Amino acid sequence: MMKERILLVEDNKALSKLVKRKMEDSLNFDVIQSYSFEETNNILEENDDFFIALLDLNLPDAPDGEVVDLVLSYNIPSIVLTGSIDKQIREEMLGKGIIDYVYKGNIEDVNYIFSLIQRLSKNRDIKLMIVDDSQMIRKQIKETLQKHMFKVLVAAHGEEALNYLEDNTDVKLVLTDYNMPVINGLELTREIREKYNKQQLAIISLTGSNEHLISAKFLKSGANDFINKPFSNEELICRINNTLEAQEQVELLSKFANHDFLTGLYNRRYFFDHINDFLHNNNQYAIAMLDIDHFKNINDTYGHDAGDMVLKHLSAILKNNTKGSDIVARFGGEEFCIALANVDEKTAIGFFIKLKNIISKERVMFKNSSIKYTVSIGITTKDKKENIEQLIQEADKALYKAKENGRDKIEIY
C-alpha cells in the first residue's frame, strides 16, 4: 500500500531537506519537494493527490503568495509557511481558506507543523457534533471543523442532538450553545452525562460573554471546557484539539494498564480482572495455555530483537484467529493464555489443531534469516462454572504434558 503524500514547496533547499527528513522520520507520509512556482505547477499537472501542502509564501518566481492560489485551486488543504509576521498578509491568507499560517522562525515552529499534520491525520476518523439554534453559527463552525478534516454533524437544539447520538455512538465531542429551544445546552449536557462519561464523550459549551455564571454551571454539570462568544476560529480549534488530546492520553494510559506493551495483547492483569465475568457469561468454554517451543534458542541464536519479532508475529496470529468474545492474553515471556467463548470440547480441539498448524507453517523474516517456530498447547474445557485458578492449573498440566511428549503438540486435561 502506497503512503499518502505531502507537497512541500520551499525555495530554501537546506530547510526543505531538513523538513523532509524530519517528516519522513516521524510521520508516515512521503514528502514531495518543490522549490518554485513552475515546478509546483508541473508536479500538480502530473498528480494532484496530496494529503496536505506546506507552502512557502515567497518564491523566486512567485513572491506574493501566488503558489497558495495555485495549490488551493486543486482543492489541496494547505498550510502557509512564512518568515513574515505581517498581520494583513496573515488575515488575507486565512481568508483564502488555508488551514493555518505558520511562522518558520525556529525548530519549535517546525515541530508545531509536525504535530499539526499528525492531528489532521487523526481528525479524519473523529466525529464531532455542533448544537446551536443559529444556522449561521452552525455553518461557520462546521466549515472550520471540516477544514481541519473532522467529520461533522449539526443539530439545532438538544433534543435533535440526543436523537443523533442514538444513531452515532462514535461521536467523540459535542460543541453546544446554551440558549436553545426544546432542550437547552445545560440540559443537554446533563442528559449526555447520564449515559457517557467525560472520557467517552467530551462536551465544550459555547456561552455568551454576559453569561459568566453559566460557564461554571456547565463545568459542574460535566462539560470538559467552555468557550466564550465571540471566539476566533483558532481558539475554537485549539480548545477542541486540547480536549481530544486529553482524551487520547487517558485512552493511552488505559491501554498500557490493560495491554502488553510489546504485543498489544491483553496482559495478565486484564485477564484476571475480566475472566470471572467471562466464565459467568459462558456455559461452555475452553481455557488454553500456549508456549513457544525452544524460545530461548531463538533468542540465543538470533538475538532478543528476533525474539521480540516472533512474539509479535505469534500475537498477530492469535488475535486474527479469535473472536471479540474470546480473551487472549500474554502472561509473560513466551507464555500465552486463551479463553474461547461458547465452544464445546470437540470444537475447541479442532480450533487449536488448526491454530497450531497455521503457526508451524509460518516464517518470521529477520535480517537475512527465516525463523521457524512451533508451539505447545494445553487445553481444559468445561460446561459448568469452575474456579479460574483450578482451570489454569489444569491447562498448565496439559501444557507440561505436551512439552514432555516432544513439543509442537496439543494435550487436553
Image (cartoon, rainbow, N blue to C red):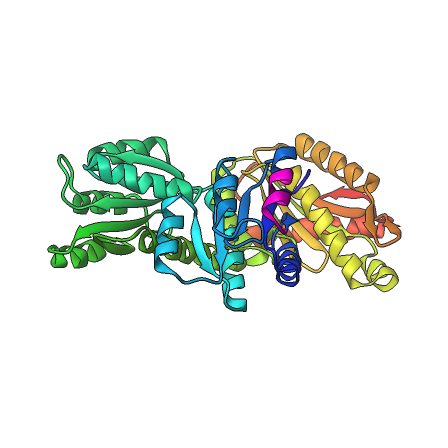
Closest to the observer, 38 or 125:
38
- Name which residue lies at 62% across and 43% down: 38
At x 62%, y 32%, the residue is 344
The residue drawn where x is 64% and y is 44% is: 39
Residue nearer the viewer, 89 or 30: 89
User: Where residue 227 sits: x, y (%)?
Assistant: 25, 54
Q: Where does residue 63 sit, x and y in percent of width and height?
A: 51, 52
Q: In the rendered image of this protein, does residue 381 appear above or below residue 258?
A: above
Q: Main secondary structure of the magenta part?
A: helix
| Residue 127 visible, this orientation | no
Please give left or right for residue 258 compared with residue 209 in the image.
right
Of 378 and 211, the residue lying toward us: 211
Q: Is residue 3 left or right of residue 67?
A: right
Query: Would you say 355 lies left or right of 109 here?
Result: right
Residue 40 on the magenta segment: yes
Magenta stretch bounds = 35-43
Of the pair 23 and 244, the residue shown nearer to us:
23
Which residue shows up at 58% across the image and 54% down it? 60
Q: Quadrant of the C terminus?
A: top right
Instruction: Point out residue 267 in the picture as x, y percentages from the top left corner.
Output: 58, 56
10 with respect to 196 (left or right):
right
Answer yes or no: is residue 81 visible.
yes
Q: Say if the magenta span includes residue 283.
A: no
- The N terminus: image quadrant: top right
The image shows a total of numbered marks equal to 0
